Amino acid sequence: MARLWGRIGTGDDEVLTWVPRESEPRARPPGFHSLQGGLSGDAIGRLNPKLGDEFALVSEGGPFVRAAISAIDEAAPWAPVLVLSDKVDGDDLPEHPCLLRAGLRSLIRDDIDDEFAHLANLRRVVELRALIEPRDKLGIMLQPDPDPDGIASGYALRMLLGRKRPTAPLISFGEVKRPENRAMVDALGIDVRTVTPDELDEFDSLALLDVQPTVFGESPPARIRSVDAVIDHHPERTGYDTVIRDIRPSYGATSTILTEYIRAAGMEINPRLATALVYGIKSDTQLLGRETSRNDIAAFSFLHAFHSPALLRRIERPALPVDGLRALGRALSQTSVENGIHLLVLGRVREDVIPQVADLGLQVDGAEWAIAAGIVNSDLVFSVRNVGYVRAAGDVVRAVVEGLGVGGGHRSMAKGIIPLKAFRKVYGSATREVIRGALHDAFERAIQG
């Protein structure tokens, strides 16, 4: 281990010292001084330790490490000590006010594993570029009413592939509606084009970001059942074909995957792209507080150095429309928390108001689940939030809408859509009282599962 340190090289403020032992008469490695007089306080004192100096002990021998700590404590009781050993653990070490232990091989192994992860991401970038480069027009498909994670991921993929908007537009079956999402695309100058299934024929390549084909219903358009690439962090679904599939359910955001691609490719990242990805990670993990992996934290930390705080502030302070506030007031006047479920029925509202109210609803005392429901055109639309340690919201919503509509989502947030015609067929009418009773009973059954 000492020889390995010698090969790694020393810093300008480091001195390598070899302690010869009679039982191990080996020549000192290159780059090391020899400690004369054996391992003792006097010998350590001859190294002239000064206030601010630190000691690192590299050995697999417990007796040697313990003796070395005692010698250092005698010569320089104020000195911090770092023990690097894969065999000597903390229980084998004497009491010392400023001592840390780490495994040398594990430290090296972690760094090597990180480099292999970068290599795997680089391989995916190479595959994507080779696949897409010959294509004339790539459609980067996002979910209807795209969220920040999807928007940021699509924007990042376009830049990673070296494409411009005309040859790689971001597309969706539904327009961007939520105020903070509209603020994001406006502030960053990102255009998301709303298309119909028939318009997909203009693209000779499709990549789905933060979404999978089967999210578009039991029978999604034929054109998106066979695509070039699917990159997503939601649970993997079947029922479609793709050339490149990168699904990572352990990640909190698809933006994290694209950040890892960018890092592996050594691509220069500008403030607009960094801000988009920061907000994508931040919004999908609720500021790294929900369903977050070490990869999300590492990506966020990397991006933070490049993002624009001013741009981020413009995105994060969207306006709630006046009619949305009025609908919220009416819903709050009749709200209550029953068995941990906080249900808010808003009546006829703009769709972007519904998820904002669901976010607010979870803050009520005693609420483990918050459901905000409203009528949008000819549909009953509801957003669901939970505290994260209960049954997965996506599973609950799918159970609620089964046979009536579509829905799904994450562990702690989800969305459902039920056509009013289908709702009335089952429940007779769609008044606030009927909606409230039907949804509460349906969610209670689904949560108890």
Image (cartoon, rainbow, N blue to C red):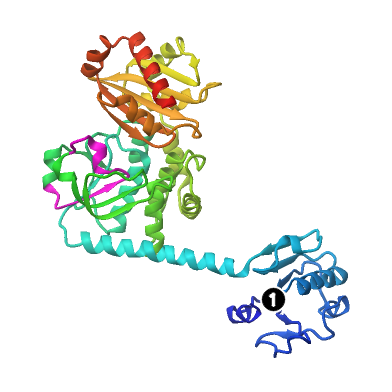
User: Magenta residues?
Assistant: 202-220
Q: How many marks?
A: 1
Amino acid found under the numbered disc labelled 1: Glu
Is 117 displayed left or right of 139 in the figure? Answer: right
Q: Position of residue 132 (x, y in %)?
A: 21, 59
Seen in the picture, residue 392 relative to 238 is either above or below; the reply is: above
Specify the quadrant that holds the N terminus: bottom right
Residue identifier under label 1: 14
Q: Residues within 10 Å of mark 1 (few under 14, many from 20)?
A: few
Q: Residue at x 63, y 66 (%)?
A: 103
Residue under the point 80% across and 66% down: 79
At numbered mark 1, what does the secondary structure look like: helix, strand or loop? loop
Q: Say whether residue 271 is left or right of residue 246.
A: right
Q: Is residue 327 above or below residue 188?
A: above
In this rendering, position of residue 306 left or right of residue 262: right
**Is 107 colored magenta in this rendering?**
no
Residue at figure coordinates x 52%, y 66% from the top left: 111
Residue 300 position (above or below residue 42): above
